[in-house]
Image (spheres, coloured by chain):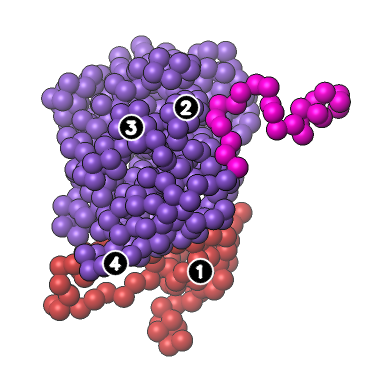
Amino acid sequence: MPARLLKFAFSRQHPEPRMFTRHDTLKPSYDVVIIGAGGHGLASAYYLTRDYGIRNIAVLDKGYLGGGNTGRNTTIIRSNYLTPEGVQFYDESVRLWQNLSADFDLNLFYSTRGHFTLAHTDAAMRTMRWRAEVNKHYGVDSEVIDRQAVQEAIPSMDIDCAGHVPVLGALYHAPGAVARHDAVAWGYGRGADRRGAEIHQNTEVLGIELEDSGAGPRVTGVRTTRGRIATRKVLCAVAGCTPRLLEMVSLRSPIVVHPLQAMVSESLKPWLDPIIVSASLHVYVSQSARGELVMGASLDPYELHSTRSTLDFTEGLAAHMLEMFPFLSDVKIVRQWAGMADMTPDFAPIMGLTPVQGFYLDSGWGTWGFKATPVCGKTMSFTVARDAAHPLIQGFGFDRFARYSLTGEKGAASVGH
Amino acid sequence: MKLMTCPINGPRAISEFAYGGELRAMPDPDRADDAAWADYVFNRTSLPRVKLEWWCHTPSGVWFIAERDTALDTIRRTYLFTQAART
């Protein structure tokens, strides 16, 4: 190793400015503490500093920035959901996505590809028509296309899927896109950092301090592995760790944690432009800018708080990929991984205020959280700053289960979750 | 391959089993108020720990209880529900 490199490694005066400032100590108090330095947490910090002038913010993460589901998803962005709440929410998100690279002055490689949700059964075709009509009503570009149109759009696909699940048609969503997921966390993190928010990695939250002076519990502070912080507002954006945080404030929720796995192939010449999803075959696939096929399937079938990978998943997904694209039989899989998905019973998120004053929740993002990153930041920063749920997230409240008033988004889940 | 022991059929591949959720006590439907019933219907304790869960060996249709660590994905014990009631 050259001496210069060694010297550089031990120096604290790195000549190249990093994306973020490193803070050696926590301050004794912050106006807002955000738990989870993933896309959602950093986006909330970004909009709190930019739009609401709240700069005294700490973003804590027990691991590293963007190391959770922000860096583990398959980067698909779309807004062709089923419920009015979902469609409007994700449509706003797509609009924000389209300007984000300019907003950050950082290339997110946002790439509009078109998104095909294949239907292999009459029941699926019926749901596609329903989704297309709801989408059109809210001005989202979605249409049902027939089998021939699918084949023309994706000429390399076996339209009969090895004969046993022939494609009948598809829901085509032109704004469907992919983006570079790590850069999203970096962009939001850098923007928040520049405006005064502090990002503290390797800082695990051990407990949340509450007081109850008769009007119900309210947040007074956070205990971490690096000391105590006094704060009146805590935003929890921790995906698969949500149940552990909720236990710290003695709240029960319907969230269950299941692993969601994904994998990528070796790099290939560009051949697949659109994003393809098949619920019947449990496949979603797109080709990244590096030429890798990024593939995902459905959730693991049982609860687990771990990011282990399984061979069952790889075998199952590879088999279904070959039914659609038999010519891939020589292509190698180079990586697989998993994230912890916080699933809700109605497949809609849980966002906004909670029965604990000053404890705000951005959770239940299950398998669909990446595409919502910008709009979550927008709506949660509003919610934290004003202490009132943003109009776009009122259908996603924590109390909807106690009222038996669910927001059934299940039909729009691309893959049988 | 991951194995699970069915109390009737012995060790089998995990792919032969279906997960049935955690073992929970149902409140009396006639006495429970709406809040208690909603809590039973929707809320779960999804924390990493050893839990009692319902599992089904699907080829034979045997429902049983598994003690499983949801952090490590290790199965400690499996037994029929009647035995669970006794111990």
* Crowding at mark 4 (Cα within 10 Å: few <14, some 14-19, many 20+): few
The residue under label 3 is: A53
Name the side, left or right, on which A413 lies relative to A291: left
Q: CA distance from mark 4 to mark 3?
A: 29 Å
Residue at 34% across / 18% down in the picture?
Answer: A98
Disc 3, SS: loop
* Element class at badge 1: strand
Chain the render paints purple? A
Camera-side residue: B12 or A374? Answer: A374
Label 1, label 4: how far apart the Cα atoms are: 32 Å
Q: Which residue is mark 1?
A: B50
Quote the CA–CA distance across marks 3 and 1.
45 Å
Q: Amino acid at mark 1?
A: Val
The residue positioned 27% from the left and 74% from the top of the image is B26
Viewport quadrant of the N terminus of chain A:
top right
Secondary structure mostly taken by the magenta-highlighted segment of the chain: loop
The red chain is: B
Image spot of residue A303 (x, y percent): 45, 57
Residue A12 part of the magenta segment: yes
Give the CA separation, mark 2 to mark 3: 13 Å
Q: Amino acid at mark 2?
A: Arg
Q: Are marks 2 and 3 on the same chain?
A: yes
Quadrant in which residue A374 is drawn: top left
Q: Which mark is residue A389?
A: none
The boundaries of the magenta stretch are: A1-24
The circle drawn on residue A194 is: 2
Q: Chain of mark 2?
A: A
Kindly state the secondary structure of the residue where label 2 is placed: helix
